[in-house]
Image (tube, coloured by chain):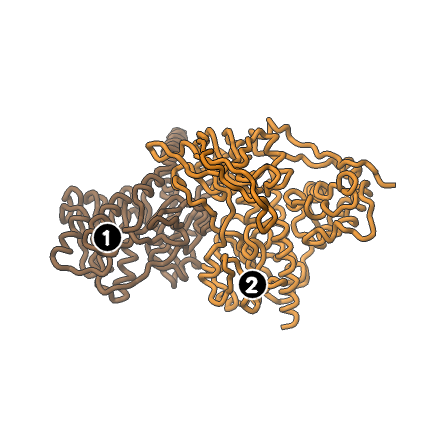
Amino acid sequence: MANMSLKKLPMPEQDPLVRNKNFEEVALGYTAEMAIEEATRCLNCKNKPCVSGCPVNVKIPDFIAKVAEGKFVEAYEIISETSALPAVCGRVCPQESQCEGKCIRGIKGEPVAIGRLERFVADYVMLNGGAKVTKAEPNGHKVAVLGSGPAGLTAAGDLARMGYDVTIFEAFHKAGGVLVYGIPQFRLPKEIVQKEVDKLIAMGVKVELNVLGGKAITVEELFEMGFESVFVGTGAGLPIFMNIPGESLNGVYSANEFLTRINLMKAYKPEYDTPTKYHKVVAVVGGGNVAMDAARCAKRLGAEVHVIYRRGMEEMPARAEEVHHAQEEEIIFDTLCNPVQVLGDENGNVSGVECIRMQLGEPDERGRRRPIEIPGSNFVLPVDAVIMSLGTSPNPIMKEYTPGLETNKKGCIVANEDGLTSIEGVYAGGDAVTGAATVILAMGAGKTAAAAIHKYLSEK
Amino acid sequence: MYKILRREDLNSQVVLMEIEAPIVAKKCKAGQFIILRVNEEGERIPLTVADYNREKGTVTIIFQIVGKTTQILAEKKEGEYIQDFLGPLGKASEIEGKKVAIIGGGLGCAIAYPQAKAFHEAGVEVDLIAGFRNKDFVILEEEMKKACNRLHIVTDDGSYIEKALVTNKLEQLINEGNEYDLVIAIGPLVMMKFVCLLTKKYNLKTIVSMNPIMIDGTGMCGGCRVTVGGETKFACVDGPDFDGHLIDFDEVIRRSKMYSIEERQSMEDHKHKCNLEGMH
């Protein structure tokens, strides 16, 4: 008999006013007892809507059934059949709009806490000696993967499992892409990302750091080197600024810069050399998940933090859970206003941001109500830093150094539903194709491309 | 890990290192840069490629000891290793024209030199003006001589060859009737600013090389943004070479000082730590 509780079993978390001063993980995870209890809420229904809601089609009811039986390692093996990064997905996937969004239990009450269960299973296995890694029989074919973010890691993992000789080329000095430079430690501990990467290495995947794939070694050269197919997972690119006066003042950052200093370069730890400023009042402009990450990092460095967003709370694109966590951590939301200029002092440092109030008008083509300026409603918020979190535009490097690689009007790489680009044997996926999106969508694209590469090379 | 094959003090403040980095050496060109990290806790710093040897697979960097990172890098010996070395980054310099004037100021000569060499090897007539504070700071004299048609060394105090500023020398050469298609200026921001003010007067196209604060060097962080002709450009992917007449130098100078307090503190902490360790 299923556990008919209407609510998900809550996951223990650090107290908001304690955690907003440290970089330790916010959510502490289920215990084994809690996981078993929550797992019994799954009805194991026949048509499994949750599986179709998952971009990598994890066999959700099957793994949850194993959790309910206390067979956590078996549960892990089921997840691993389709997901290369369970510990990551359990933490950063927007489950509410994917698997959990489709859960039957969510019709009346809350859905099964699929994300929390996935996380528990992955952490349990990591804590208890790690996953059993089997090296596939080599099939003698070499594939190159450019970029080690979620798309690249997933493609590499799937290809390695099929016996391919895979080499990942990563420009940074650490593998993981956005999982290490973008998502903060308190949401996704970097040790976990490293363990996932280590798992791939144990499977035989080679990781070449400090190589700007596509430029230092071009796609053409990769083919000359004996790679038979290339997967491009180079991620999103250049940060977008607002093009308003004062954006070059000292103290205006892109969210990418601010987060990279903190997450990848560990500027918040005294033993690391990368500098970061300890600002007093910080404005974060934007309402996405990246804006929440930037705001919560700024808070942890001791600042009073304002999120400035031109629409209302309802319209905010960030996950509800992230917004909720930010609010708990005493981040101030100044919605329905938009910066018109950044103000500076005589030394060129940021001294404030002038904003204008907005109201919501008619819905736009995407159905979101358009923000309209209220004339004469300008006001100045005194701040000493502004973090622009407005998304990114595609990185021009791949296109520039890859003749024949087609990109669309926006500059994103054009790929078909299999991830195939305009060049034979070259596949792409993740933000490089879609523009800034989520970790799991990038993983889904990596997975699709890996299957397509396998088909292509098998038939070649 | 990247091995230091050669290390040489060019003067009391400036160090040359030849690093084993075959992937970078294979295709780097004049004007491009690398990003290195000395050790696990280190920051990422950009340095322009001073020279390369494709056969040996080596890249030469020349740097001035200005802060903690360059200090600990300078303390590395031949045969030791640097943690990370990424490149080539940025766009290569465009080699064009019949006759060019290339100006290096101080450490900027380490970048002016490969540019002069590239132009010279392409058959362009090169006047190279190298400015230094005084005799003790002169670097790369022999190398530069070979990389141009005429080398003009000037010093601020006249302690070596000729007392002049690089701008004086350039103006003199122009007034003597030298007709340049292009001027390239690389050195301290203030020097580049004044070269540009001068060449604007003569309507002489001038390229400058920017070396702003950056983290990734691949277009991701946007820390290196410079305003060029009213547009925001990223030095790491759009540069580092830009039309000097379009650069907002005052803004670049201001942005370059963003972390000066933190950098000074970091250097002092490092010196303090070294002193303490030296007492054992």
Q: Which is more toward the observer, A417 or A127?
A: A417
Q: Which amino acid does label 2 sit on?
A: Val
Residue A188 image offset from top left, x and y in percent? 61, 41
Residue ID for mark 2:
A230
What's the chain of the residue with tag 2?
Answer: A
Can the viewer see residue A326 in this picture? yes
Q: What residue type is labelled 1?
A: Ile
Q: What element carries label 2?
A: strand
State the residue lying farthest toward the top: A17
Point 39% across, 41% down: residue: A245
Q: Quadrant of the C terminus of chain B?
A: top left
Chain B hue?
brown
Can the viewer see residue B266 in this picture? no
Chain A hue?
orange
Q: Does A354 appear above or below A194?
A: above
Label 1 Cα crowd, 10 Å radius (few <14 / some 14-19 / many 20+): many
Residue ID for mark 1:
B103
**Residue B47 shown left or right of residue B195 in the figure:** right
What's the chain of the residue with tag 1?
Answer: B
